[in-house]
Amino acid sequence: MKNRLCLLLAAFIWGTTFLFQSLGNADIGPFSFVAVRSLLGSLAVLPILLWYQRSKGRPARAGGRVVPAAGKPWPLWLCSLLIGLCLFAGTALQQVAMLYTTVGKTAFITALYIVAVPILGLVLYRPLRLTHLAGCLLGVLGLYLLTYHGDGAPFNFGDALVLIGVAFWSLHILCVDRFVEWYPGIYLAEGQLVVDALLGFAILPLTGEVLTWEALRAAAVPVLYAGVLSSGGAYALQIIGQQGVPPTEASMLLSLEMVFGALSGALFLHETMTGRELAGAALLLAGILLAQLPGRVLWARRDPRFR
């Protein structure tokens, strides 16, 4: 139960963070927002990491370097790098997208990663079920209704960026699910945020964004909320929660962020949806929930390690 509550709280924080991301874009560049929020997140997680080290002990070290123990084929730094890359791609695409699309639509489209996780899970030798395919079809239809505007283009630019980000959120879920079998989740939480922050600051010169104290002061509340609570607290809650919950169930709990996101956009930004968009959101939600239900196995790959 404790793990599930962690995931539910993470979903609430992430859902309401969409609102603050949108507000932050008015005062600070999107890549600057990503860099600063991740830096604050890593600083927020650091005390938890230090407490964990004192109470549980440090992972095996050799020559001052964290090394994998038996059954851990990849070192901690490589695992952190991989999930950090996925995290940066997902957050950056999402932040830029919110310059062009609404909070509610961003939340619903992002939640498509819940449908994509079982499909991509085939790579990790998880079975493909009938409910996965049915949920995927409903999700695609819902996405079409949600994003089609009748002007000849199925998506606007922001919708397309959010959709691309879905692939990276899905990979992030699957990588975390594998890596928490090897390392404590709090180490992965800190590592991914450090990577995310470094990438964010490194890309600023390439985008032409200039980070100023004036911009930081103007966007202080959105950046602090997204950094401390979302990038720090919620990502730590996700990784800790996933240690005791199967990935598909974790995805279902985390998918509630789209509901919290849409509600926050409607309540505080007065966003509305057309009847067509509401129907699309309903189909998308149905597809996401259906993809989490047990069903007949259509195809399963055998892990060659156990043949």
Image: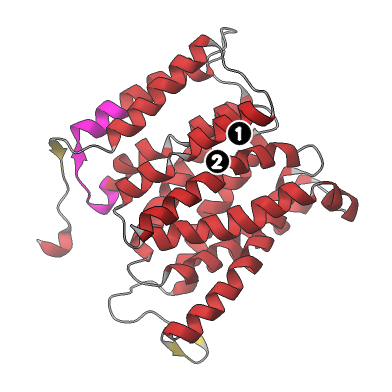
Q: Residues within 10 Å of mark 1 (few under 14, many from 20)?
A: many
Q: Secondary structure at mark 1?
A: helix
SS class of the residue under badge 2? helix
Residue at left 34%, top 27%? 287
Image coords of residue 79 (percent x, y) = 45, 66
Q: Quadrant of the C terminus?
A: bottom left
* Residue underneath mark 1: 264
Query: Where's residue 262, x and y in %?
Result: 55, 30
- C-alpha separation, residue under disc 2 versus residue under disc 1: 8 Å
Name the residue beneath numbered marker 2. 15
Per the rendered image, the range of residues in magenta is 122-135
How has the structure been colored for display? secondary structure
Which is more toward the observer, 191 or 233?
A: 233
Helix, strand or loop for the magenta stretch, by majority: helix
Q: Is residue 106 visible?
A: no
Relative to the observer, which residue lies in front, 263 or 171? 263
Q: Quadrant of residue 197?
A: bottom right
How busy is the neighbourhood of tag 2: few (under 14 within 10 Å), some, or many (20 plus)? many
Q: Amino acid at mark 1?
A: Ser
